[in-house]
Amino acid sequence: MNYKIVEQVSRKKKSMSGVLRVVMIIFAVLFVVMGITISQAFMLPGFLLAGLYFVFDIFSQRDYEYMMENGQFEIDVIYGKKYRKTAHILELSNLETVAPHWHESVARYKKNGGTEKLKKYDYTSYDEDTPYYTMIIREDGHKIKLLLDLNEELLHAMKTQYPEKVYFA
């Protein structure tokens, strides 16, 4: 059975990132104007601050794309709506469990109350209204913990393939 399911999740912006952007622009313009009127020594900090603004703009906006296709689950990180990087390509045959973060099947992997410590990757939107799921899976021989905002279509597709490993909220 061939299938391909794609979901895109946008990470919520941090609360003070807009204020930081405005402050960076104001200081960059101020330094460039001071470089024109007072001394050219102010020009370099102004241009460096403008460059820093563009770098901050790219790396502060993050979207995630989950793609499930023929037994593979791929996670891409999209920076600044322009640059894409593949973070994980996982075989679903190595899946241990997918469950809501509060479910008993992932309780032993919790940060403070769990008995097993795993490397954690957070690919959620940070939206309080969206329930997130914990996926425990093997990658390169090691178990990892992924936090994901999975939609119903992805969950149902996983549930049909691995009914004993996928739990709903």
Image (spheres, grey):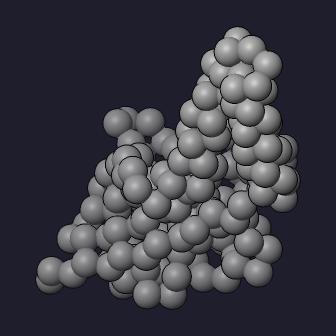
In this picture, is 143 found above or below 107? Answer: above
Task: State which quadrant residue 7 falls in.
Answer: bottom left
Residue for point 73% across, 44% down: 25
Q: Nearer the viewer, residue 19 or 60?
A: 19
Give left or right: position of 111 versus 1.
right
Give left or right: position of 97 versus 66.
right
| On-image quarter of the N terminus | bottom left
In this picture, is 151 found above or below 120? Answer: below
Residue 164 place in picture, x, y as percent? 47, 74
Residue for point 76% across, 68% down: 102
Question: Which residue appears farthest toward the left when viewing the image?
Answer: 1
Residue 150 place in picture, x, y as percent? 53, 75
Task: State which quadrant residue 33 falls in.
Answer: top right
Give left or right: position of 36 versus 78.
right
Q: Nearer the viewer, residue 74 or 114?
A: 74
Q: Is residue 122 at least partly visible in the picture? A: yes
Residue 9 place in picture, x, y as percent? 54, 70
Residue 51 place in picture, x, y as percent? 57, 33
In this picture, is 19 found above or below 140? Answer: below
Q: Nearer the viewer, residue 138 or 115?
A: 138
